[in-house]
Amino acid sequence: MSDAVRAGALPQAPAARDAYAWRALLASMVGYAMDGFDLLLLGFMLKAVAAELGLTPGEAGSLVTFTLLGAVLGGIGFGMLSDRLGRVRVLSWTILLFAVFTGLCALARGYWDLLAYRTIAGLGLGGEFGIGMALVAEAWPAAFRARASAYVGLGWQAGVLLASLVTPLLLPYVGWRGMFALGVVPALVSFAVRRSIGEPPLFIARAPARRGTHPLKLLVANRSMTRISLGMLVLCSVQNFGYYGVMIWLPSYLSSRFGYGLAQSGIWTAVTVLGMALGIWLFGQLADRMGRRPIFFLYQIGAAVMVIVYAQLSDPTALLLGGFVMGIFVNGMLGGYGALMSELYPTAARATAQNVLFNLGRGVGGFGPIVVGTLAARYGFPAALALLSTIYAVDLVATAVLIPERKGAALE
């Protein structure tokens, strides 16, 4: 093992030898950044959208839920297409679909057409995670796989951070329709991705082995794969339930309990997102050294503890620091899923596994805002947040019992 790998530096060899690996990483990061921007954007705009269109709280919350349910369907469909037709080709399709229907939200006249636009945009959103993670895993060397996958995860955080900073500045001037109209910009990215990146050599080399195989069946091909898929479904569900349960309601919580305005809530949320970004980056660094499972255990315990601690805070400075630390653990695990699932599943089902399992988890996570909102209305947001700690205990057990360690394994 080289000194660079021991030191955990961002790999230099791929930069000098293979510009393709870096282009694949950049394309995957940008695609995922657009997803993060859109979903937090919706969280900030729910109040304005509901007021203009006369939506009930349940209807407003369902816009998030159906976006995520659309992502489940898109994840399944586009994942299988990617394993058959190519990573880059299908990734560009998902970005284009997501961009067009996000832009159409600006033209919504009522609840039902807006719900339809959000659901279809979710189809595109659901395809991007798994395809991008598979593309990067196949393009980067095994010794750097967790770090490269973590950088894709950082793309999401960059989009969320951008939304938390830009939305308070632009929303008062362009309104929620103007913010949705900006969603058409990523359509240009889809063309750039298609023109500048070819398919991974590993994907092309494995083409003969894919003939006659059904990607979904490979997820449950035998008892061992079924156990692994069940374990990954639990991990992805907990990840998304905890994330959306916290992030969708955090601005409203800070506003209602502490009287924070839109700009101040945005700053506090941005600090939490910065903690999440640090957590993702750190996960990749540690997982390439110590293995995937030990770092998942560390983060699951940290998440269970910090959501309880954060729920007890009331001092503004403590909320700022507590949100930063909570973010490290609650969403830092995103840095490990891409590498872990890439090592657990073969090339013929890699994107399908990433998309199906992570987006089924998103479907479960879509109920996070509803559950947290319902519990908060009855018991208060601190109590609802504290109850989230129990899901991380389930996460810990699933990792220990169902998920094997395959750090640095050659991709099948």
Image (tube, grey):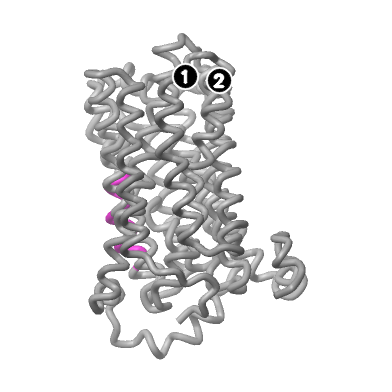
Location of residue 310 in the rendering, given as x and y in whole percent from the top left corner:
45, 26
Front residue of this view, candidates 158 and 371: 371
Q: In the rendered image, is residue 170 in sight?
A: no
Residue extent of the magenta highlight: 68-79
Quarter of the figure that contains the N terminus: bottom right
Q: Which residue is mark 2?
A: 318
Q: Which residue is mark 1?
A: 313
Q: Is residue 190 magenta?
A: no
* Horizontal side, residue 193 vs residue 343: left or right: right
Q: Percent from the top left, x then y, of residue 288?
A: 59, 64
Q: Residue at x 42, y 47 (%)?
A: 300
Quadrant for residue 207, please give it: bottom left
In the figure, residue 218 lies in which quadrant? bottom left
| Amino acid at pointer 1 | Leu
**Label tally:** 2
Residue 234 lies left or right of residue 86; in this view the side is left
Do the residues under discs 2 and 1 have CB atoms within 8 angstroms? Answer: yes
Q: Residues within 10 Å of mark 2 (few under 14, many from 20)?
A: few
Q: Against 255, is 128 above or below?
A: below
